[in-house]
Amino acid sequence: MGDKVLMKGNEAIAEAAIKAGCRYFFGYPITPQSELPAYLARKFPEVGGVFLQAESEVAAINMVYGAAGAGARVLTSSSSPGVSLKAEGISYMAGAELPAVIINIMRGGPGLGSIQPSQSDYFQATKGMAHGDFRLCVLAPSSVQEAVDLTMEAFEIADRYRNPVMIVGDGMIGQMMEPVEFKKEVDPEKLPQKEWATDGAKGREKNVITSLFLDPADLEKHNWKLKGKYDRMEENEVRYETYNLDDVDTVIVAYGTTARIAISAIELAAEEGIKVGLIRPISLYPFPYDIIKKTAADVKNFLAVEMSTGQMVEDVRLAVEGQKPVYFYGRPGGMVPSPEEIVEKVKKIGGGSR
Amino acid sequence: MREEIIMAGFGGQGIMSMGQLLAYAGMKEGKEVSWMPSYGPEMRGGTANCTVIVSDSRIPSPLSSRPDTLIVMNLPSLNKFAPIVKKGGTIILNSSLIDSEVKRDDVEVIEIPANEIANKLGNSRIANMVVLGAYLTHHKIIDIATVKESLKSVLSERHHNLIPLNEKALDRGTEIV
């Protein structure tokens, strides 16, 4: 540990899961994240982990449910179409209050779409994963190092709230190589006991894990209890980064790899004397509404940049509360915006020098 | 210093490993690096390319829309990427396989008969190392010695017997420029 290694995002996330003390993986391969299960298939046997390639995504997520119910740190990963198949199980897990980490290395959609990078699962991840009143904590890394750090943290957050946590990366995060450092290593034997787990009731009251509440009054109570957890997440788990916010006209809001392309655009714009800053949401749920709202007083306008036809932009509008215009620039379908295109858009919306 | 390089050719020419080797060596020298491959169906028998960025500071976009340097191993890649090379940038081309002029007068063009040199060394598959040696002699962003040291980390163990040959190819590359 401590030494830097050059790793692909997918493999680095897998190694981060091992370092976080995760020893269970259930999944089904799909491009562009297949290096992740491939890495664990190789490494888990060395550390006494269980790697299982299920017959389908539906089977895999229900295995994750089982392992989480037994108290294990458990991981699954997929890409967009595969995550849709897991959606039902994720709803069950949120209902049954089961912690797990779910990786979505997003590709173009809808349907089978393409295998190229995309951010078109924002709505799904943050708002509409599946039926029922629930939320996932959703984290979006913009570098391989951050993917490692957030994956390790995701297991902690999942356990803290007894709720699934999703890491969303676009295909670029999965495929690119960058130097990474693994800053700590968790011994799975030393993880705190989960007293709610169904791991054998000998000598104690039995634990029940279920998402079925036939009495609506009971379910209402359960729903308000879950809501209380999401409120606590909104209080404690907001993460973001700001870049170059002093004395700028336009603020770009972008997450993941797109935020890095936005920084290239900001450098390019600066060469022409155009002042642009960036707010990068790291947690997509809970969304960093406050910093965006606060910034609105000092700038001319906002530009949401996404690899989609416009999803996160709705949260930016909610945050800005009509104080300033919010514009959008997007490339969907697996296309990636260039810094030059973003600068063009900044000029078009009148974000030039004062 | 930030150097953005696109490397391109067809599958099997060692484009990806040439990029990984450069990125790894950059990391060893304490620089910020990123390696971004093209991925997808086009890789199967078609063109392969990767973007490597080596920088003294945090790297923004891991892609490059205006590369400082283009290293091209075949003609389709030259046609695809030559127009986006930064004004005043460099194109290093494999003249063994590219029998065509670069239609730009605002970039420096370096022609390396990489396959011929590699064949003389006994293995056409090390043409990539000849070109990398030439590039790093022209653009001294990373020490060739660090690249050589990195070979054992980047090449899979079954290819470690080829390390001396790779080193020789790097050296031949340095002699040409």
Image: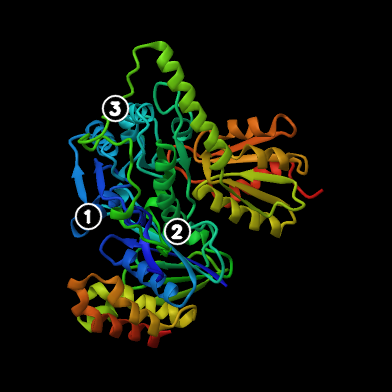
Residue B172, quarter of the rendered image: bottom left
Q: How many marks?
A: 3
Please give the residue where the numbered disc 1 appears in the rendered image. Answer: A44
Circle 3 crowding by C-alpha within 10 Å: few under 14, some 14–19, many from 20: few
User: Which label was assigned to residue A145?
Assistant: 2
Q: Position of residue A250 (x, y in %)?
A: 71, 45
Q: Residue furthest right?
A: A354
Please report contact status of discs 1 and 3: CB closer than 8 Å, yes or no: no
**Which label's residue is closer to the chain start, 3 or 2?**
2
Please state which of the two labelled residues, at mark 3 or mark 2, is closer to the viewer.
Answer: 3
**Occupied quadrant, residue A103:** top left
The answer as to whether the residues below labels 1 and 3 share one chain is yes
What's the residue type where badge 3 is placed?
Val
Instruction: Using the rendered image, report if marks 3 and 2 lie on a common chain.
Output: yes
The residue closer to the viewer here, B148 or B120, is B148
Q: Quadrant of residue A177?
A: bottom left
* Mark nearer the viewer, 1 or 3: 3
Residue found at the far bottom of this picture: B175
Question: Which of the marked residues, 1 or 3, is nearer the chain's N terminus?
Answer: 1
Circle 2 residues within 10 Å: few <14, some 14–19, many ≥20: many
Q: Mark 2 belongs to which amino acid? A: Gln
Left or right relative to A228: residue A48: left
